Image (tube, rainbow, N blue to C red):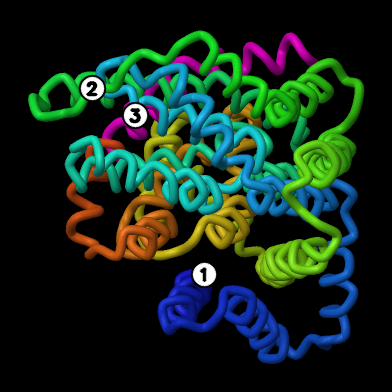
Amino acid sequence: MEMVLIFALLFLLLFSGLPVFLSLGSLAAGIIVLSGQPLSSLAGTLYGAMDNFVLLAIPLFTLMAQIMAKGGVGDDLFDFVHVWLRHLPGGLAITTVVACSLFAAICGSSTATALTIGTLAVPAMLRYHYDRPFTLGLLAAGGTLGILIPPSGPMIIYGAITDTSVGRLFIAGILPGVAISLLFILYCYLHSRRLPDLAREVTSTWAEKVAALKRVAFSLLLPPVIIGGIYSGAFTPTEAAGIGATMSFIICFVVYRRLKLKDIIPILQDTVKVTSMLLMIIGAAVYFGQVLTINQIPQKIVQFATSLALGKWGFLIFVNLLLLFLGCFLEVVSIILIAVPILFPILQLLRIDPVWFGILFTINMELALITPPVGMNLYVILGLAKTDMAEVLQGVWPFILLLTVGLIIVMLFPSLSLWLPSRAF
């Protein structure tokens, strides 16, 4: 009864519109006060939650993403892919998916990917007679690749909570990310073949292709350096974030010269805003988790799950349905910080690989980004296209099905996630 009451109050606070960190922190503090315990542990818990070397990757990757986004790297990537693929049936749609994948490998943010690539792709696709719902749905779904293809902010948080290697998680996300991208590309190709009025573009000359490659060559160095360094063991994910931020500064300020010294302050301000928001939520979530542990809530949940005798696959199906439900009402970071500490003890009990589960969890978070009413990418596209939610949902539902297919494939074939990490570590 106590467990049900706590989570009912939490959802009530979240659905009331109270910020996530205040919902978690105020409820935890209220439980502590009612139980007669001192609040003096709050400061130490908050400090301890953020005193984690792994979490240092978050501001560094955020800084890298801010520099690359403001430096126009997304524009270069889109133009580069478009020049090489525009002659294919549905070439512009396929270009959008590939550009999203490449930009995701640079910035690690779904909303940034959807916004940056969408700014270019939406007017271009409409100009070439792609239907609006398909165009908007593709951009919303393509942006979700930002959290699956490394680097990934949610993976960093998951790794910090579960003490799972972030490097293994990053490497494990590569093949599933490629597989889901290919599913999107296949759908774009088949959908475009059914549109008789779709304008076809002429094949680019080799001179145009080489020129486009030169414009983007330095930016394309980032993903192999970051992922290759982690894969080879040359540096940790946190060190990779520092190297990525340094390289992005050199590329945009020194090589391309698109940014000036005056741009540093706005970039740092945006980085601080994003990082502070995430760390406030993380600190409050850790404190909430500590209060739950004191009241033996996780142990009671494990006992309840064990009594149901769901087994490994029953538990995974239950978790996927639970995350689908939570994804309709909560944003990604909140779901990770609330659900993972509760689910992880059951994970250990059933001997489920935490890296594999982390990838399954991340794909579920991709779905959360495009499921109404709180899917963040839906609102990014709404603001970008100045349209209504019905039109975006009309175009996004096929991609929800494709992501679900991708989730099932990764569930049935764990080696798709685990093969690369097993070779690297």
Counting from the top left corner in percent of width and height, residue 193 is at 16, 19
Tag 3 and tag 2, C-beta contact below 8 Å: no
State the residue in front, 406 or 90.
90
Q: For marks 1 and 3, give the CA distance.
A: 51 Å
Picture residue at 63% right of the left edge, 11% below the top: 419
Q: Earlier in the sequence, mark 1 or mark 2?
A: 1
The residue carrying pointer 2 sits among few (fewer than 14), some (14 to 19) or many (20 or more) residues within 10 Å by Cα, namely some
Tag 1 and tag 3, C-beta contact below 8 Å: no
- Amino acid under disc 3: Leu
- Amino acid under disc 2: Arg
* Residue picked out by circle 1: 3
Is the C terminus in the top left, top right, bottom left or bottom right quadrant? top right
The dot on residue 92 is: 3
| Residue 284 in the figure: left or right of residue 203 | right
The dot on residue 191 is: none
Q: Which residues are magenta?
A: 400-425
* Residue picked out by circle 2: 200
Picture residue at 63% right of the left edge, 24% below the top: 172
State the residue in front, 210 or 320.
210
